[in-house]
Amino acid sequence: MVVLTESFAAIAVVVERLVVQEEAAAIELVIAAPDEGALAIPSEAVAPLAGVTVVETPLLPMAPARAAAVRAARAPVVVLGETHVFAGPDWAGRLLQAHDGPWVAVTPGIGNANPAGSLSWVGLLMDYGRYPQAGERRETEDVAGYNAAYKRAALLELGDKLESLLEPGSSLGDELRARGGRFLHEPAARIDHLNVSRLRPWLVERYLGGRLFGASRSRSWPRRRALLYAAGSPLVGPLRLVRTLRAARSAGSLPPTFVPALVLACLAWAVGEGIGYARGATAGNIGRMLEFEQHKFRYVR
């Protein structure tokens, strides 16, 4: 399990869910952190695990930090975890069982850790709605960028490309598939994802998600192509709206304000994505998104 954090407190719940796994003794926790000493890892909290490896690295940009942690890992299967994602009781066993097959990456079933309210559901379904906790395991054309379990060897084969392919909006799935990789969705390997649910931070997060996506996606494009996509960004909102409504069918009963909230979120994302194509992303944008990634509990009602 690879995770980025500045303090152990930010991943305490993540670790609590890891140590109760039946396979805990086979789980290595790899932490990318600016300062190992500042983590203050309680030895008793991680004692059931196979080991803890700390990679001292700046957390910004986040993609190189994740890449450094992947390279430091020893296990053959690597999960690109997050501080706000919590494993179900038999999550590890089901992922490892799935990896006995021909899959380069396995995406678990992703549920809602704070299901009260529309804002949380909109965030979850926009980002991970294609990977519900319902249904049968199935082969997929793509894989979730984060919280999926990858064969480490396949990631290492990407060489110097790994950093850029771990950025939001990257073509990691396309690259792995072009190399012959196949992907599986295993709904029974369940995790719960915590989502921003306070209105103002939620709008900021949706906007930043779009901006970082557009900036990352267009980084190597000719300027003319980036501006063309920026001009077409008003189409992004309706496209994401349709995709998310399709994904919402598997979520069961949703709050009555879900659709208006989704429309607002798609608008914020589209504005951000258009600006990302036209102007890229600033250090401030990236730093604010790191704050959401590291401390999502602060932005939950």
Image: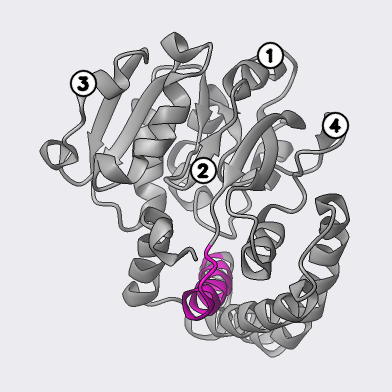
Identify the residue under disc 1: 97
Report the Cα–Cα distance between label 3 and label 2.
22 Å
Q: Is residue 122 left or right of residue 164?
A: right
User: In percent of the image, x 43 and y 47: which residue is there?
Assistant: 163
Give percent across and percent down for residue 294.
37, 54
Identify the residue under disc 3: 43
Looking at the picture, tell me which residue is in the foreground, 133 or 95. Answer: 133
Identify the residue under disc 2: 85
The residue segment tinted magenta is 196-216
Give percent across and percent down for residue 263.
75, 81
| In this rendering, the label closer to the viewer, 1 or 2 | 2
Q: Secondary structure at mark 3?
A: helix
State whether residue 182 appears in this view: no
Give percent across and percent down for residue 283.
32, 73
Identify the residue under disc 4: 138
Q: Residues within 10 Å of mark 1 (few under 14, many from 20)?
A: few
Residue 251 is tagged as none
Q: Amino acid at mark 4?
A: Arg
Q: Earlier in the sequence, mark 3 or mark 2?
A: 3
**Residue 144 is drawn in which quadrant?**
top right
**Residue 186 is drawn in which quadrant?**
top right
User: Which part of the image, by quadrant, shows the N terminus?
Assistant: top left
Q: Earlier in the sequence, mark 2 or mark 4?
A: 2
Report the Cα–Cα distance between label 1 and label 2.
21 Å
Report the Cα–Cα distance between label 4 and label 3.
39 Å
Report the Cα–Cα distance between label 1 and label 4.
14 Å
Q: Earlier in the sequence, mark 1 or mark 2?
A: 2
| In this rendering, the label closer to the viewer, 2 or 4 | 2
